[in-house]
Structure formats: C-alpha cells, structure tokens
Amino acid sequence: MPLLTVLAMLAPPYQIDSVRFRFTQYDQRGVGYQSAAGPVGQPGSEWLSVQQPQAEVVAHVGARITERLWVPIDVITAASPDHSVYGLPVGSPPPDAVTTASRINTAGSFDTLTTYRWDRATELSFRAAFHIEEPFESWSYGLGLTRSFAEDNTVVGVSVNQIVDWFDRFKLDGKRDGRVNRSTTNVNATLTQVLSPYTIAVLSYGGTLQVGTLGNTWSSVLMADGSRGEERLPRERVRNALSLRLAEWLPWNGALKLYYRTYLDDWSAYAHTMEANLIQRVVRGLHVRAEYRVHWQTAVRFYTEAADPLGLGYRTADSDLAHFVAQTIGGTISWDLELNGRVRDVHFDLGYERYFRSNNLTVDIATCGFGLIF
Amino acid sequence: MRRWLCLTLVVGALAGLAGLGGCVVVPQNRRKRLADPMMRFDDDSLEAHKRQKFYTTREAAAGGDGTPAGGGCGCQ
C-alpha cells in the first residue's frame, strides 16, 4: 500500500481536455440482389435502422502524453442472424435468422489512442481497439508517426494498422458452419501543406491488403433460374486510394472545403469521390454548414444479378459492390458557447443528411452532438 | 491499363501540387485564418467516425484518408 501511494504521488498530472457525446440515427430503405428478403427471382429488402451513441474523452497525462478513449455503440435492426447458438458445435440447430430474434443486434467498441510528443516537431501514436458483436470479434492495432517541417508549414505523417477479425460462418439455410477470420493490413502516408495564409491542403495515400474470408457469409447470389446460391469471394484483396483535401478561408467569415479521392483495387473496382463543404459563421460561436458529396464506382468484376447455377467461379450480388452513383446532401448547425470557468466551451450541433444511390438505396441520417471542452 | 494510366496522372498532378506547396513558407503570425476551427478537416472526431464507417460499409471504395480501409465490422 505505501508503494502504491508513492507511485500515485509520482504520477504525472492528469487533466481532462474534452468530453464529447454524439447520437446518430440511420434509417435505410432499398433493395439489393444479395438479400433474400423479397419475392422469388427479385432483389430483397435492405431495410434497417441503426441507433449509434458514441462517447469520447481526451486527456493529457503530463506534458507529453495525450490519451483518447472512445466508445461507440451500434444498435442495429436486421443486421445479421441472431446467434442464439453461439459457442455450440458445428451443425447445431440454425439461428433464428428470419423472425423477430434477428431484429436487434448490438455492437460495441473500446478504442484508445495514445499520442506521445517526442519533441516540438515529432509525435508518435499508438492505437488499440477491440470490437464485439454477435457473432463477431475484432482486434485492431496501429502505429503512427508525424513530423513537421518548415516552421510547421509542412507536416508528414505515416501510419500502419493491423485488424484481425473472427466471426462465425453461416450457410444460406442459417446453419452455423464454424469459425472463420480475416486480416486487414493498412499503410497510410499523409502530407499536409500550407499553400497560403488562407489555404491548406492534405494529400493522402492509403494501401490495404486483406486476406481471409472477406464477406459476411450469409449474403446470397440470385441465380439465372431464380434460385439462390452462396456468395464466393476471393480470399485476398489489395486496395489503393489517393485523396486530396483543400480548405480555403473565405473573406466573409466562411470556409470552403473540397475533397477528391480516386480508388482502385484488384477486384476491378474503380471509384471517384468528390465532396464540397461550405461553412459560414453567422455570429460568434454559431456556424451553419452545407454539404454535397458524389461518389461513382464501377462494379467488381464478378458482380452478377443472374449467376450461372453450375458456375464454379467467384460471384457476388452485393449491391455495395455494384456499379452505382451515390449522392449525399446535408446540413449542420452548431453552437459553441464560450465560458470563463473550468469549462472553456460548450458545444451543441444538430445535423441531417440524405444518402441516395442510383441502385435503389436511400439512407436518412440525423445526428446531434454535445461536448465540453476544458 | 487505362485505369492505371489515370491513377498515374492523378498521382503526378497531386505530387506536383504538393511540390509547389513545399516552396511556400507562411510565417506563423500570418496563419491566423488557418488556425480558425472552421478550417479543420476533422473538427469533431465522432462526426468523422460516423462518416467514415457509414461510407466504408456501403461503398466498395474505402481508404486514402489516413484510416484503415475495410476490416472490422461492416464485412468488407
């Protein structure tokens, strides 16, 4: 006990910098060929709703260490088979995949990020996270390094992340078929550059290698004869993405942010994404933001909506892997109230977005945030 | 082939832009506007997570934003 007391006295000072909460509601409607929840020979429903509360605490430990603790939770309807037989042997009675038992699934994560300031220009970061939901667990680790140059006009960052997922494999009739896994290794390089007293740009590259079971195992594929078969995906995927962000200060107390990304992977998916955000300060602390995003992608090379029942090759009918154009339009209003006490700033925001795709999917997203900055 | 060519062109153009930017040194006392919270790319990490997860789980193209692409829940 005396040792603990001494250690506590020697511990560096600990100060909470901010506490934030956010609640988001997603309501999704549409149809997709991977879903069997529809008439025979036609795409099935992709209806679901998600309630997503999140909490985050950021604190300083001493002069050099910053800790971020973040806990997101997703409560999802119609997300996946209810795994009431979790842990039972292969071949056990099938989970209830079609009745009310499958209508709610809860997923949670525990995510920590530690940043260590090595010197005035260099920071190291370490991330560790754990995610759990029925019937899925995931570990994630990451290491990052950032260094600034030229009087902080240029900041270069590199990071590497490793994610390992374990989950149950299901047959299309709902029977459990053992455990499977996948690995995701990701490297990122980021260059942040001040271009003028009013303009800043960020150029990023991300490369990702995925190995293992790369689907959820219960998505089905519609056959040419109207029946349904299992999805078959390659066991490896290499993904490359390059993005550029620009932020420009506007003289009427506003800001314009532009984003472009190009993407290419070895499943032959190719995509362009563009986004514009316009932010306006109405009065001190009160901001409104308008947003528009458009995303265009090709289908993966083995996407099909009428597969050969005798075919042995790769196949998927997942609407997320199809060719489509997706648009998002939305807006946010936020209010920051500055105080003079221990709490320096109280933040509120309220936002709404609509995401709609050319292949029949629409999602309404409502969100609200609350934060205390110390 | 055409896609790789496009990607190469984009990389070249962006690298050139970054190179031009590297010639600029704006002193700290002239970066007041850049320090405004409105100019931050991810001013709210919870909002950024919401967006990243939403798009990662509904589109085939993810990554390039300094965060993992795929893996974890969301299936792809």
Image: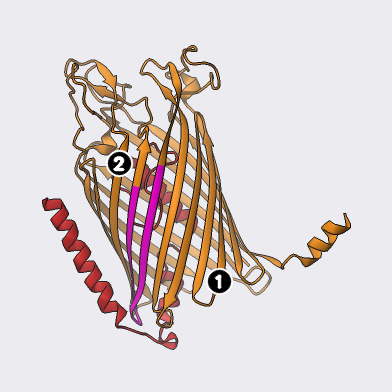
Q: Residues within 10 Å of mark 2 (few under 14, many from 20)?
A: some
Magenta region includes residue A205? yes
The picture places residue A46, in percent across and down from the top left corner, at 33, 31
Magenta region includes residue A185? yes
Q: Which residues are magenta?
A: A184-208
Q: Which chain is orange?
A: A
For residue A118, the mark is 1
Q: Is residue B26 left or right of residue B20?
A: right
Q: Three-letter amino acid code at disc 2?
A: Arg
Q: Residues within 10 Å of mark 1 (few under 14, many from 20)?
A: few
Q: Three-letter amino acid code at disc 1?
A: Trp
Task: In this rendered view, identify the residue nearer to me: A117 or A71.
Answer: A117
Instruction: Using the rendered view, name the quadrant where residue A230 is placed.
Output: top left
For residue A139, the mark is none
Secondary structure under the numbered disc 2 in the rendered image: strand
Name the residue at 29% across, 54% down: A241
Q: Is residue A144 left or right of residue A268?
A: right
Q: What color is chain B drawn in?
A: red
Residue A257 in view here: yes
